[in-house]
Image (tube, rainbow, N blue to C red):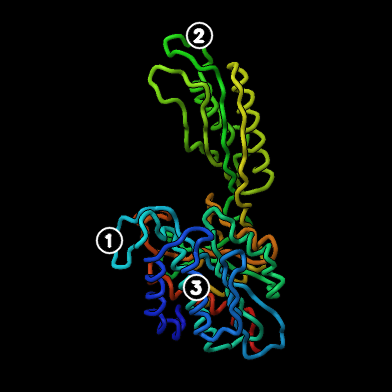
Amino acid sequence: MPVLDRIAALAPEITAWRHDLHAHPELQYDVHRTAGFVADKLRAFGCDEVVTGIGRTGVVGVIRGRAHGSNRAIGLRADMDALPIQEVRDLPYRSTVPGKMHACGHDGHTAMLLGAARYLTETRAFDGTAVMIFQPAEEGGGGGEAMVRDGMMERFGIEAVYGMHNIPGLALGHFAIRPGPIMASTDRFTITVEGRGGHAAQPHAAIDSVLVASHIVVALQSIVARAVDPLDSAVVSVCALEAGEAFNVLPQCVTLRGTMRALSKPVRTLVRGRIEEIVIHVAAAFGARGSIDFGSGYPVTENHPAETDFIADVAADLVGEEAVDRDVAPMMAAEDFAYMLAHRPGAYIFLGNGDSAGLHHPEYDFCDAAAPYGASLWARVIETGLPLR
């Protein structure tokens, strides 16, 4: 069966939990209602231990199997936070908070892991400990790193950790994964170009910072095209430009903001170095001054080979080998599950969300029909990874 019978029976409850979470989105670490909802459910299910406040507002539920001979523990992670986006679909459970919505499916991720927790507390057909990790602040806040820094791995004896994310466009009941890099690193940058302000009718008496900034934008696009090996992957995007306000004044300064992405540390270092060189030297060539400030984001999310094979095998046993892509192309989006994979072996797998709007889109909605597949996979990861003898 592609979905475990008990989880299929729990599907209406999982859907109801998801709709409640969707209607009450919270951002980054300010997920107090969501964390309380999760903690209350875990206690009601009969988790052996429920710990709150890890990584500021994270929640961990501990479920011990009916046997304890292995003394092993596997962590399963879901993210809880929403996005600062205004929902546009008129759903019965649409967001009740203006300017906030679950546009990435974290409501579904949380509901799936709750469903797996409910199942595992009832069955306990495993030898060891299942650690259910509910993380805040995936959307730019580094909540995964915060939970790791709070000693989560050591405190709960986690030996391997797994994460899951829905993917629009991937068919329902399908999974996709790959060993090695599966999500990119991300760094944000702020570039300041300082020229010499002046009258627009007398450009020769000024140093046109807008012109200089425009040359920098164009030059930055040469990095991926000419500095990065064509067999590697990288992205450099300038996403905001702030300059003067008058139609007849050449502004003194221009500010550019953007992001860079890479799938390896060497390429990340190369791209960062080239951005710095271009900003400084292109500006100098025009008699202006260029400076750049980097804000480090998430590192590359790299799946460990053995754990990738393991969860792919579990998925294939669940839905069939034909429904598991074991060599999916990596994505240039970023994911702070990278911090957990940097501290413990594990893997990050994609779950099909069917034909839905894209992630971070105001019309996006997690597909409730996908939840039983995700919850079933989580349950089987524990039962297969911590088998009864």
Q: Nearer the viewer, residue 86 or 388?
A: 86
Q: Secondary structure at mark 2?
A: helix
Label 1 crowd (10 A; few <14 / some 14-19 / many >=20): few
Q: Position of residue 1 (x, y in %)?
A: 45, 81
In the figure, residue 51 lies in which quadrant?
Answer: bottom right
Q: Position of residue 224 (x, y in %)?
A: 57, 36
Horizontal arrangement in the rendering, residue 293 relative to residue 324 (left or right): right
Q: Which residue is mark 2?
A: 204
Q: Nearer the viewer, residue 124 or 307?
A: 124
Instruction: Please tell me how many numbered marks the rendered image carries.
Output: 3
Q: Which mark is residue 90?
A: 1
Label 3 crowd (10 A; few <14 / some 14-19 / many >=20): some
**Quick check: marks 1 and 3 in contact, CB under 8 Å?**
no
Q: Nearer the viewer, residue 205 or 230?
A: 205
Inter-mark Cα distance, 1 to 3: 27 Å
**Quarter of the image containing the C terminus?**
bottom right
Q: Which mark is residue 61?
A: none
Q: Is residue 388 above or below residue 184?
A: below
Q: Which residue is mark 3?
A: 36
**Quick check: marks 2 and 3 in contact, CB under 8 Å?**
no
| Closer mark to the observer between disc 1 and disc 3 | 3
Q: Secondary structure at mark 3?
A: helix
| Closer mark to the observer between disc 2 and disc 3 | 3
Amino acid residing under circle 3: Gly
The reply to whether residue 379 is in sight is: yes
Q: Nearer the viewer, residue 2 or 380?
A: 380
Identify which residue is drawn at 31% across, 55% down: 88
Amino acid residing under circle 1: Asp
Identify which residue is drawn at 54% across, 32% down: 221
Q: Is residue 205 above or below residue 92?
A: above
In the figure, residue 146 lies in which quadrant?
Answer: bottom right
Horizontal arrangement in the rendering, residue 227 relative to residue 258 (left or right): right
